[in-house]
Image (tube, rainbow, N blue to C red):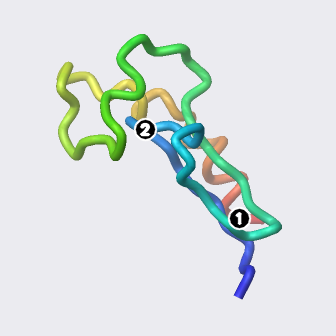
Amino acid sequence: MNAPTTAIFCSTVPEFGFGPLADNSKIIETKDRLNCRPCGLHGFRKCPKNHFLCANSIDVKYFLSDATK
């Protein structure tokens, strides 16, 4: 289908080889350097450090501006 795709990375990183395959794709992730990220190959639903900064530090405005394009 090659549909435009936006992928959100929290506790894992695109460098592990996961991510969108579409020609028109974008990856959204925290801009903060977190020493706890990645916390695993596939990430976790619950943060091992109980702060989930990898997700909570993503600016919602950044995501929404991309999603409305």
Q: Number of callouts in the render?
A: 2
For the view shown, which residue lies furthest in the front direction?
A: 17
Alpha carbon distance from label 2 to label 1: 25 Å
The amino acid type, in three-letter code, at marker 2 is Thr
| Residue 54 quadrant | top left
Q: Residue at x 61, y 24 (%)?
A: 31
40 up-or-down from 68: above or below: above
Q: Residue at x 47, y 27 (%)?
A: 57
Looking at the rendered structure, the secondary structure element under dot 2 is loop
Residue 56 in percent (x, y) is at 40, 32
Q: Which tag is nearer the camera, tag 2 or tag 1?
A: 2
Q: Residues within 10 Å of mark 2 (few under 14, many from 20)?
A: some
Q: Is residue 32 left or right of residue 45?
A: right
61 up-or-down from 58: above or below: below
36 up-or-down from 28: above or below: above
Q: Is residue 34 left or right of residue 6?
A: left
Residue 64 in percent (x, y) is at 63, 53
Which sits in the foreground, 16 or 12? 16
Figure quadrant of the N terminus: bottom right
Figure quadrant of the C terminus: bottom right
Residue 2 in percent (x, y) is at 74, 80
Q: Is residue 30 left or right of residue 25?
A: left
Residue 30 in percent (x, y) is at 55, 30
Q: Residues within 10 Å of mark 1 (few under 14, many from 20)?
A: few
69 up-or-down from 38: above or below: below
The amino acid type, in three-letter code, at marker 1 is Thr
Mark before the other along the chain sequence, 2 or 1:
2
Q: Residue at x 53, y 50 (%)?
A: 8
| Residue 44 quadrant | top left
Q: Which residue is mark 2?
A: 12
The mark found on residue 39 in the picture is: none
Q: Which residue is mark 1?
A: 68
